[in-house]
Image (cartoon, grey):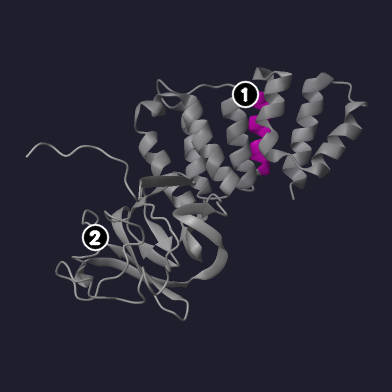
Amino acid sequence: MGQSVTLPAASPRAAVSQTVGITEIAVNYGRPAVNGREIWGKLVPWGFNDLGFGTSKAAPWRAGADENTTIRFQHDVRVAGQPLAAGTYGLFMALASSGEVTVIFSHDAGAWGSFFYEPSRDALRVTTRWEEAPFREQLAYEFSDVTATSALLALHWEKRRIPLRLEVDTDALVVANLKRELTSAKGFQHQAWVNASTYLVQKNRDLPLALEWAEAAISRPFVGRRNFLTLSNKAAVLDRLGRKDEAAKVMDEALPFGTAGGIHRGTAPWRSSRATRACTRMSGRSTTGWRGRIRRWAIFRLRWRP
């Protein structure tokens, strides 16, 4: 028999992905259409069922059409508050007429539908509730309410919406990733150490490590540079650690290396409306030039940072 020809699928495959922080989440699924059919409780039966084929006598819905719906997490996540390891999973659902939905993440990601579903292969089960929603002819998965640490994934079809909250510990992932990247070729650039240190300061996280990275940007062999960028970054870390006198001393060392634009950018992490107003008041009375005005502004920020 000759090889099968390629024709349009009744339920075409689709994919949607979303990056949450630095974690990519991707869903691959078949998109069935309503086509005038009764969906919930009929085409998609309630609960777990014997589908009359395969080995499963209590199969959930494949949450799509044809091959398994799959979901891939680049890093570990929390689903509806429950931990789930990075990986690719088969995605199944079992709906109740009461509105409760059991969402199943299965280690069996390569099966055709749920005909061979095996509960012992479940990685995680969580519950959510379906909601009434505007009519959708074709099934679709969509991401919304995306932040640096979370997103809402929802299945939409006919007049139902099934939402699922996903969360990621982005700060921990970023720090772990920075540690890896700083041992790679990227670690031979002093800017990389500055950027890594700045991230920790902005998040007020692991400040001793931020200081270590700030110092590496200045003095690490073959990498370190003693310039306004690296020195002002170290001053910002010392400031956040509460070591204000040391921070002021490092800023004094940094200022001769700076340009007006560079100093403006380099002191951005310290800015506050209070300090900015004070700097504005001083600017017309200083007799030591713009470097002196910036130094005054920086010291004011160090002493009075909210």
Q: Secondary structure at mark 1?
A: helix
Which residue was labeled with disc 2?
107
Residue at the farthest front position: 36
Tell me the amino acid under the disc marked 1.
Answer: Phe
- Identify the residue at image location x=48%, y=25%: 190
Q: Return the x and y of residue 264 as percentages of the image width and height.
A: 72, 27
92 sits to left or right of 283: left
219 sits to left or right of 249: left
Magenta segment includes 246: yes
Pick the front one: 106 or 251: 106
93 sits to left or right of 274: left
Tell me the amino acid under the disc marked 2.
Answer: His
Location of the N terminus by quadrant is: top left
Q: What label does residue 124 carry, if any?
A: none
Q: Return the x and y of residue 11 as percentages of the image width and height.
A: 35, 51
127 sits to left or right of 272: left
Q: Is residue 227 positioned above or below 245 on the image?
A: above
Residue stretch rendered in magenta on the structure: 244-254
- Identify the residue at image location x=56%, y=51%: 147
Pick the front one: 243 or 102: 102
Gap between marks 1 and 2, in whole Å? Answer: 52 Å
Observer-side mark, 1 or 2, equals 2
- Identify the residue at image location x=57%, y=48%: 203
Q: Is residue 111 positioned above or below 126 on the image?
A: above
Magenta segment includes 108: no
Q: What label does residue 228 carry, if any?
A: 1
Q: Return the x and y of residue 148 as percentages of the image width and height.
A: 54, 49
Pick the front one: 143 or 51: 51
Mark 2 neighbour density, 10 Å: few (under 14) some (14–19) many (20 or more): some
Q: Return the x and y of residue 206 as percentages of the image width and height.
A: 50, 49
